[in-house]
Each structure stands twice: as C-alpha cells, then as structure tokens.
Image: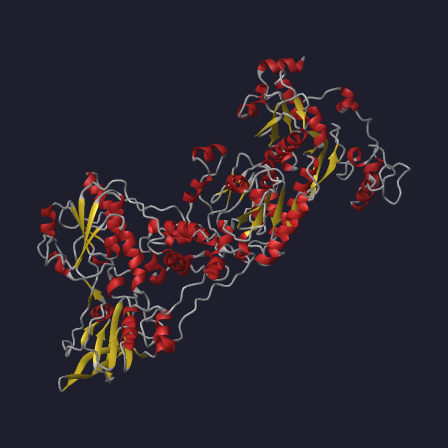
Amino acid sequence: MMHDGELTSGGLAAMGGAAGLMQRQWAPCRYHCPVHADVRAYIELIARGQYRSAVDVIRANLPFACVCGRICHHPCEANCRRNDVDEPVAIRELKRFVAELQGAAGSTVRKAPVQDKARVAVVGAGPAGLAAALDLARMGYRPVAFEKFPVAGGIPATAVPKYRLPRDVLRHDVEWILSHGIELRTGVEIGADQTIDGLLAEGFAAVIVATGLPKSRALNVPGMDHRRVLGAMEFLTAAAMDRPMDVGRDVLVIGGGNVAMDAARTALRLGGGRVRAMCLENEQEMPAWAWERREAEEEGVGFIRRRGPAEVLLRGGEIVGVKARKVTRVFDEAGRFAPLYDDADVIEPDCDTVVLAIGQQADMGFARGSGLAADDRGRLVYDPATHETSVPGVFACGEIVTAPGSVVEACAHGQRAAAAVDMYLRGVPVRIDDELPPAIGTISQEVGGKVTKVARAVIAARPAAERAGCFAEIDLTMSEAEALRESRRCMSCGGGAEVIVDKCAACLTCLRVCPFGIPVVTDVARISSDLCQACGMCIADCPAHAIVARSWSAEDLKAATDAALGRLPAGEGARRVVAFVCGHHAPANAWRGSLDDAVGGVAELYLPSMARLSTEQVLHAFEAGADGVVVVACRLGADRYPHATERVRKRVTAVNEMLAEAGLGPDRVQLTETASQGRAAMREAIAAAADRIAAL
Amino acid sequence: MIVAERKPLDEILNMLAPCKRVLALGCGGCVSVCLTGGEKQAAELAVQLRLAARRKKLDLAVEVDCITRQCDREFLTNLKQDPRTFDAVLSLACGCGVGFLSEQYPDVPVLPAMNTTFYGSNTAPGVWEEYCRGCGDCVLAWTAGICPVAKCSKSLLNGICGGTKDGKCEVNPDMECGWSRIYDRLAELGRLDEMRKLRPPRDYRKDRGGGVRRLVLASMTADDQTQEAKE
C-alpha cells in the first residue's frame, strides 16, 4: 500500500520539513518518465500561471522540453492515474504549451560557476549526445559536440517531419542547451574529418559516441539498387534539409512503423501523385502509433497490408512496381518477428519510387581511426552498466547501443553516460545507482469514482485536406485557458496528506471531512497515498496539527498573506482587506498577482481550492494587520474538490465567532461564493464585501 | 472520554490580567478528540488573545505549545520551553491537566482555559453527550447499559420517580427520562427481573463520599510507593 516508515515529529524535524517526503514515493508520471521529470510539480506550476518556473522544472531533467512537447511518446500519460478516473492529463500538450511559450529566452540557464574541468568530446549532437554534453557542462567540464550534419539536434533535426516538429521549436532547445557552455562543431564527421584516436591525442580526456541510427536498413531483393529505391532515413533527411530528391509520382513505402508513416506523409507533401504504404503486418499488428496511421489515412495514404516485397520490378530502366508476396504470419508462437510467406499469392502493385522503412541502422564510420571493437553483428561493443566501450576513455550512449527509442529515452541514456564519464574522470569506479523510489499505486475504483470528472482538453488539428499540401504543423498548441483548465485536472499523486503518527489523537476528524472517504483510523489515522487527492481538507481541520501536506506548507500561505498586506498602501484610514480566493477557475494573471482591476485596499490570494483554507490562516490575516477577510469560494459543486464550499462555510462561521469573542465583529470575515462565476461577478462581490467590512 | 469546553474569552482575559507573557498549552488527549483543546485550538486561542490584547492595548505576549497529555509527568520533557519562564501557563487540558501541572510547576500559575464538563461519547460528528458520572460502582450490567447516575437528573438508583411525563424528565423537559429508558430496554430484552432483584445499598465511599479517589496498580508501582499505598 504505502511506502514503509511512518512519519513522526522527530522524523519530520530530521528531514527539515515535509518537502523531503515527496522523494519517498513518486507519482507514476515521474516514475515512468525516462528522465524522471517532476511532472506533478510542473503541472502544478502551469496551473498557477507560473510558466517560467514550470519550464525550469521541466528542463532540470529534460533538455529537450520543446521537442518532447511535440513528439514524445508520453509514458507519463500512459501511466497517469487519471486514466482510472476519466482520461489522462494531457501532459505532453501542457509541456508543449509552456516550453514554446517560454522559448529559449524564457528558460533559466544555470551555468556551472566555473567550467574548468577536462574537455570531453561528444560525437553526435543528437538527444543523447547533447543531453550528455549538458550534464557535463553543468558539472564544470568543457564538452565539445561534433556533428556531421550542418545542424544540431540529431533525428529531430534530420528525420522527424516538419509537420510534426517545426524546426524553430527544435532550435529553442538546442540554443538553450548550448548556452550552458557547450561548443558545437557542425559539418565535422568523426571517422573522416577527425578520428577518435585523434581526439584523444588532442587532449580530450574522454569521448562519448552518440551517433545514433541515422541510416536505413537495406532490403536484399533484386532491383534494390535502383536510384529510385530510397532509404526512409535518407529520404526524410533530404526532405528535412530541403535537398532535391529523385522522387516519382507513385511512391510505395515499404514498412509499417512510425518511420514508414513519416515517409509516406512526407512523400505526399512533396507534391503530386499517389502514396501507398505496404507492410507485413495487418492493421492490429502494425507498430506505427494508431494516430499516425489514422492521420496518414485521412491525408490520403493508401495501405497494402500483409504483403512482403520480393522484387523491385524494372522496365526500361525505371521502376514500374514491386512484386509482393502474401504474408501468412508475422510473429511466431513466442512473439518473435519471424514472417512466413505464401509464394503462390503474389501481387504487383504499381509504383515508380520505393522508400524502404524497414528499420534503422548505425553508420559505423565514426569507428574509423579508433580501436573500437564491434561484435559479430557489427554492433559497437559496450558495457550497459558503465557505458564503456572497448577503448578506455571512450563511452557510448543512445541508439548506437540501445534499441531504437525515443528522444526522452536517449536523453536519459546520455545523462547516464555523463555520470559515467564524470566518475571515470574523477578516478572512482563507475557505478551508477539506477534505483528509484517506489511509485504510487493504482487508485481504487471507489475513490476514483468520487473524483470530479473533467473532460480532457481536445487538441485542435488542421483538417486533413489542408494538411496534405504542406509541412505546416498539424496539431495546434493549446490556448492558455485550455492549459490552465487541463493542468488543474492533475490529481497531485503523492503530494497529499501524511500523518505524523505521534501527534494523532485518532479524533476521526480527517475521516469525517475527507470528501473521498480515504482515511482509515485504527490506532492512529492512516491516509493512503495511493488514494489521497491532496485536497487539503483534513490538513486544515486536524485539531492536533498531525497531518502535513507533502507538496505544500501551511506556512506558505501565512507568508504570502504577510507579503500581500505589506504591499497594500499603509496609512490612516487605509483599507486593508485580504481576500482568499479559490483559483480553480481563475486566469494566470490573477494567480500571479498582476490583476489590473484589483479592488482598492484588497489583496487577493489564490489557492487551488477552498478545501485548503484553515481557520488559522484566516485568523492569521487579522493578526498580520487585516481589518477584514473576504473568502471567495466557488458555487456549490464547482470547486476542484467535492464539498469544499460546504466546509468553508462552517469554517467562516467558526472564525467569525472567534473574532467576535475577541472584540472584532460581527462578520469581519465575509463569504462570497462567486469564484466560479467569472472575474466581473467575483470582483463585484469582493468590492461589496470590502465595503461592508469598512462600514464595521 | 473527558469533554471540556473553552471558557469565554473575556473570562480568560480577566484571569490573565496580571500577566505579560503566557504559554497557551494544548493537550493531545481528550480535548483534541473533542476538538476544543488541541494544538490547533491553542494556536487559535493565542491569536484571539493577541487580537483582543491589541484592541484593549494590553501588553500580552502569547506563545503556543502542545504535549501528548498533561496528566503524566513524562510528557513534560517534550515542552519546547520551560513553563517557569512564563507569567502563567494557560492550559487547554481538562481539569486533570490543569491540576496536575499546577503541582508540577508550583512556581507558575497554571490557569484553566477550559471548563471540564462531562465524561462523554461521540453520538454524531461534532456532538458529544454525557454518558458517565464516575460514580465508582457501575451498575450498567443491570440497567441494560443505561446509566441511572448519568442519564437520570436525580441519579436515582431504584427506579423511576413520579415526575416523568411522556418519557421526559421533569427537571429538563428536553431530556429523556433515564429510568424510563432503562425500563423499556429491560422489557425489550426480557430482563425486567433485574429490577426486582434486591441489591445491597450502594457504597458511596466509592464515589465522592470517600474523598479524593485513587487507583494504585501494585504491578506498576515502585517498591516504596507500594509500601505507601498499603499504609
């Protein structure tokens, strides 16, 4: 169920506060992210309109924030616990929204104070290589990235179609990465212009090979070497570099994966003619993402399934078609790729160009002029635990040594290699700790059923007819309003309540106020982090201060209250009112405190939900100098969490009684339930409440 | 458990009149469970006192602390500050805590922030009712679990009085007549014969009649204390 180890007051003091609790268990988004970005944290920052802080959290782990915002395969979303409620949070789209909004200029660069450690050569400025270079630069090394293409970025620069990844988006990431103190040398091919042996002799203390899989696998059938039989990678690269290609008007793409889809859809856009994709698999077996297939189909790509190419047919020196055999089986009983054909069932689809998208392979040219060993399958010899190759000081990372993967996986691998190089250069054994904290478990159906359902944002896309004619982006970015709404669907997994067991009096209050029925009270209250929604209701009402939040501190709101009152004009007769506002429906500028229509003398403080607002926090406002408080809750049922408005009504009554006893009354705390009714209604209600307070 | 309610703030301010620096001390026992005297309530009381002091231009500083219970010596080591550095300790514990702390800190006034009212049970969220009077000689085995001492205004032991009207008590018409309830319940259980049994007179020495009561568990006392207890 939960992590091991109960929390005591002593334990909490020893860890210096509750924030360290976030490390004991990770939300599944973070756990499954290959670079373990703190997804929950940046989604919350987006929800509060703090876009720079959000992108800085992303970039702490993920250098390619903009690229991944476009093309990541999002294991975070696949594992988002919101899947068990309605639909996963649109994490990739939110990342895209904030990363592109901020660009390189809006992302903080934290260079190492001094970069005076060894020089390290990185061969290949793709995701793995640049991720490694960035970490090395941050550690004070002097990385130099060598890139044979005229542009850095690797596959995102050379082979991902522009309709998926506009190149200005990629440039944000590359620029941001390089500004950490990485030298980039494009147009330099290691193995030709320079050699690894040469780099080591020149004074590079280590070399990281990150050359990836830039080439296409070839097909050994007759007619294969015709000039109009193109490898998909070469085809896509030429398209990306706007280089002219010898492409006809009837293209047949061989392959069923994402690269095949990319190639087919790119061929369509290069103008004129028919494009079809032929693959061994049937529709269910095709490895391409479902949405890629669907979009390709919508754009007019035809599909020929369950066929394997046997021969490229030539007539008069030109391609006229491909002889294709029926595939009777793609995978064997053990699920391995082992196609079987029926040679009697043959068709000959017409085409004048063939694009082979049957797999990627390495370009081993980098190994020329080095002592690097390859295995009997021609793959670089390397130790997965340490990234070391057969040559001391030469390391490898990314697709050159792993299975084909995604950008984020390449980044993770590059970061690991950087750690290995650092250990090597410090003269310590290379031992990388890959252990992770446990992930938060599945949410129960019972609790999931009580979470307020909110439909996932629908990303607008260009219509198919418009798409097929150009390389402009297909999916449009979310609007700010959509991003705020979507980020507020996050359930803050792992960020919620933690009981301090030695303070708990088992009074049952948490059990009674929890809208989701989560606490179980045996000897003390036990609140499962697999279920807790981090609403804050129990934390606000616990009589013993025995519950803390992992992802926020009650002191933060007190400090914010003090600061907000400090900013109000002082002086005789100056109005000093604090408004605690439910920000679940509020725009970013309200959260950031930059409203241009603030009511005079009223400081507005935004919270994710009224569930969190305790009687003590309201009392504190008075102690800090407020004459009155306006509590701006949502209409019943409109708060982020159920029953928050009902609970806050009771708290307001209780505080007014306490204040009246102390001689401040009556009704110094005014309640309005307009937070979900738009700025105009809310502002009017705040102004009216402030007037009533002034009249007291 | 023991139920206590916060005294009116004015009464507390009066008590604190001679003080400049006071410790509001919450208790993690019964008063936390009935949500009137825990750490949170101590903090809220402190704010109320500071606000009132500000209004009345009193020089009063209030600090806050809370310990697991105020009726055991061992918990006192967890106090964050020495109570003797204050002009008074304002205890939010029940009377047991106030009295016990007064003995532990004879040099500091230990003042009650609460009125301790009754032994109660939680009949509904936010509602506690009196169930027991600590009479020392429990008869609930023969009254179907309904206490004639607590649930009867007169604490009668031999059955209903003549003042019952429609099952309600003549002393407090909102209150159910305890003996009426006992009779009905015993009847329901087919055990009215309990009411016909002759039992020896109650030993009021087990109640207040014997003076201040104490419990001594010999298995837990130190040897010299066991000797003391025997004497």
Q: Tell me which residue sits at (78%, 21%) in the image.
A: B209
- Please provide percent x and percent y for residue A96: 38, 59
Decide if residue A449 is on the left or right side of residue A397.
Answer: right
- Please provide percent x and percent y for residue A9: 50, 33
Vertical placement of A437 versus A147: above or below? above
Residues A407 and A359: in front is A407
Residues A248 and A333: in front is A248
Quarter of the figure that contains the C terminus of chain A: top right
Q: Tell me which residue sits at (16%, 73%) in the image.
A: A220
Residue A271 seen from this side: yes
Residues A506 and B201: in front is A506
Residues A580 and B185: in front is A580
Decide if residue B176 is on the left or right side of residue A647.
Answer: right
Q: How is the image coloured?
A: secondary structure
Vertical placement of A258 versus A564: above or below? below
Q: Tell me which residue sits at (66%, 28%) in the image.
A: B57
Q: Tell me which residue sits at (33%, 67%) in the image.
A: A164
Where is residue A301, by image quadrant? Answer: bottom left
Q: Residue furthest bottom?
A: A316
- Please provide percent x and percent y for residue A542: 59, 40
Vertical placement of A61 versus A92: above or below? above
Q: How many dots with numbers?
A: 0
Decide if residue B168 is on the left or right side of residue A128.
Answer: right
- Please provide percent x and percent y for residue B189: 78, 45
Residue A410 seen from this side: no
Where is residue B218, by image quadrant? Answer: top right
Q: Residue furthest right?
A: B162
